[in-house]
Image (cartoon, helix red, strand yellow):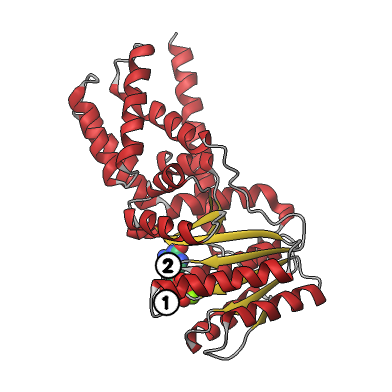
Amino acid sequence: MFKKILKKSKQENEDKRISEEALDMGNKLDEVDLEATTENSNDEAKVGFLGRLKKGLSKTRNGISGKINDVLKNYRKIDEDFFEELEEILITADIGVNTTMKIIEDLEDKVKERNITDPNQIKVLLQEELNEILTEVETDNSLNIEPSPAIILVVGVNGVGKTTSIGKLSAKLKRNGKKVLIAAGDTFRAAAIEQLEEWSNRAGVDIISHQEGADPAAVIFDGIQAAKARRSDVLICDTAGRLHNKKNLMNELNKIFRVVEREYPDATKEILLVVDATTGQNAITQAKVFKEACDITGIVLTKLDGTAKGGVVLAVQAELDVPVKLVGVGEKIDDLQEFNPENFVKAIFEE
Ligand SMILES: Nc1nc2c(ncn2[C@@H]2O[C@H](COP(=O)(O)OP(=O)(O)OP(=O)(O)O)[C@@H](O)[C@H]2O)c(=O)[nH]1
Ligand SMILES: [Mg+2]
């Protein structure tokens, strides 16, 4: 009996050591130049990938998993007060009122059904529940860029991280063997064009741009002709986030969409709305406004590293019925990841 326990605890220590090493390796990989993370080092890349996600979600992990640990210290049985504290944690993490209510109700049912009395079991149940919510809608979280050629239009209000995400995405797609071209459709400010040029250099991809004040639809038109001539796989278009008013912005976007429909009818299309996770529920409101004007096909949720309110991922997907496709977890070129619900939940709960 003792031997068995000793063996078990030895095994647990060993598992812990391995996972700590893995995390450490993930952190080290962060410092490695992205060129070094090639496709043939898949395992290493995987560790680095989860490590980076965990690092980027550390505030959210403290806000959800850390707070639950604190609550668990005060409870020996699962009762109404316990669920109330749990509810508050989830709402504070910006999971959204509706989604939180659903989670709590489901947890109450599961606790009853399975005769669970130990509060410590709740974390496993919650993980299970979050995974279910993130995967229950018929959503495909992968980027829709096949078959080539594809065009990605990137929209969103100012400052959310459109240009930065385009830079990171270009580098990522190029690393995966895609021929990428970017179009500087934000002509509202000269600095916006320069910023995108800088990112195109960093990512090592070509850029099509006009002067400040030029017609954005004309830039996208040129981008499409260049993408055809150069046989690009993916054309990624930046757009303005700030115009004189919302109506102007939506009109401008519609003009761009019309050019795309006319000039690139057979291209695979993706319209990504970028929202900033640190704005919490505001991100949902923005998404609703854009959804009225454009056929958003995916969400890019940026700056998750800067907030404890990463639960907004759940609210976005559940309340908008649009899949989260990419998440930004830092300012560096490799800090943009394809959204994977399972890894996301893992990163929130695993130390
Ligand atoms: N920490 C963090 N910062 C980010 C992330 N994504 C973008 N940023 C920062 O957010 C700021 C704004 O990013 P931009 O890419 O310029 O945003 P934009 O949407 O293009 O803004 P406009 O062109 O003004 O409409 C920059 O300082 C970025 O470095 C992220 O995932 N994490
Ligand atoms: Mg920009």
Q: Amino acid type of disc 2?
A: Val
Q: Nearer the viewer, mark 1 or mark 2?
A: 1
- State whether residue 201 is above or below residue 128: below
Task: State the separation of the CA atoms marked 1 and 2.
Answer: 11 Å
- State whether residue 344 is above or below residue 144: above
Q: Residues within 10 Å of mark 2 (few under 14, many from 20)?
A: many
| Residue 182 shown left or right of residue 344 in the figure | right
Nearer-the-camera pick, 62 or 201: 201
- State whether residue 218 is above or below residue 89: below
User: Which quarter of the figure has residue 305?
Assistant: bottom left
* Residue at (69, 75) in percent of width and height: 205
| Residue 234 shown left or right of residue 254 in the figure | right
For the N terminus, give its image quadrant: top left
* Residue at (39, 60) in percent of width and height: 286
* Residue 173: image tag: none
Q: Position of residue 85 (x, y in %)?
A: 21, 34
Q: Is residue 213 visible?
A: yes
Nearer-the-camera pick, 265 or 225: 265
Q: Amino acid type of disc 1?
A: Arg
Q: Position of residue 218 (x, y in %)?
A: 64, 82
Label 1 SS: loop
Q: Position of residue 349 (x, y in %)?
A: 41, 39
* Residue 160: image tag: 2
For disc 1, the marked residue is 242
CB at mark 2 closer than 8 A to ligand 1? yes
| Residue 308 shown left or right of residue 75 in the figure | right
Residue farthest toward the top in the current orientation of the protein = 1
User: Which quarter of the figure has residue 176?
Assistant: bottom right
Nearer-the-camera pick, 218 or 342: 218
CB at mark 1 closer than 8 A to ligand 1? yes
